[in-house]
Image (cartoon, rainbow, N blue to C red):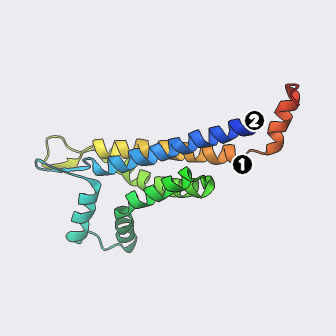
Amino acid sequence: MPNRPTAARSMATKVLAASAAAGLVLAVVGSFLSWFRSGSVNRSSYQLVGLIDRFDLTGNPVVLLALRVWIVVPLLAATAIAMLVLGLTRTGAALTVVLAIFVGTAAGFAAVQGGDEGGPIGVTPLGPVTTTIGTLVAVIGALGAVAVSLRPRGHDGQAQQNRGVS
């Protein structure tokens, strides 16, 4: 007969890891939605990164590195999801949290910038808000999965003894 608290902990870890993976999927989907409007053209975050790079709009090496990393966000998210699915919870969660902080910060910054709806250029909220929500879900799921997986085993045994289960 399986140890119920251990099985419950395993199930909770899987559910939380799945929510982290779902959050990453939502964040990546949001990164492909409209982030920027110029005239009647809406652009995704990747098109915006391409424009910044093409027109050499920044000379800051940190920003240039962030732009290079942004291009591989879907690949990094897929890697984190694969780790979570394969049961590498702590490693997958660590990558999820780092990626979500990076992506969520950029998306949150863009979301709060807003834009002049009547102006010729501006930020469109759909992509940044979707991405921000996805990263928040991913971080909560990842941290929850790690917390549940790190819960001391003795705690489960103590709970069994308190309920009179042997």
Can see residue 114? yes
Q: Amino acid at mark 2?
A: Pro
**Residue 113: x, y in percent?**
31, 47
Q: Amino acid at mark 1?
A: Leu
Label 1 residue SS: helix
Q: Tags 2 and 1 in contact by the CB under 8 Å rule?
A: no
On screen, residue 67 above or below 123: below
- Taking the spot 68% from the left edge, 43% from the top edge, the residue there is 148
- Taking the spot 34% from the left edge, 66% from the top edge, the residue there is 67
For marks 2 and 1 on the same chain, the one whose residue lies earlier in the sequence: 2
Determine the CA span between mark 2 and mark 1.
13 Å
Q: Nearer the viewer, mark 2 or mark 1?
A: 2
Bin the neighbour count of mark 1 within 10 Å (Cα to Cα): few under 14, some 14-19, many 20 and up: few
Residue behind mark 1: 150
Q: Nearer the viewer, residue 92 or 107?
A: 92
On screen, residue 125 above or below 69: above
Can see residue 112? no
Q: Is residue 125 left or right of residue 21?
A: left
Picture quarter with the C terminus: top right
Q: Nearer the viewer, residue 53 or 96?
A: 96
Residue 94 lies in what quarter of the image? bottom right
Q: Outermost residue toward the front?
A: 1
- Taking the spot 68% from the left edge, 46% from the top edge, the residue there is 149
Residue behind mark 2: 5
**Residue 1: x, y in percent?**
78, 35
- Taking the spot 39% from the left edge, 70% from the top edge, the residue there is 65
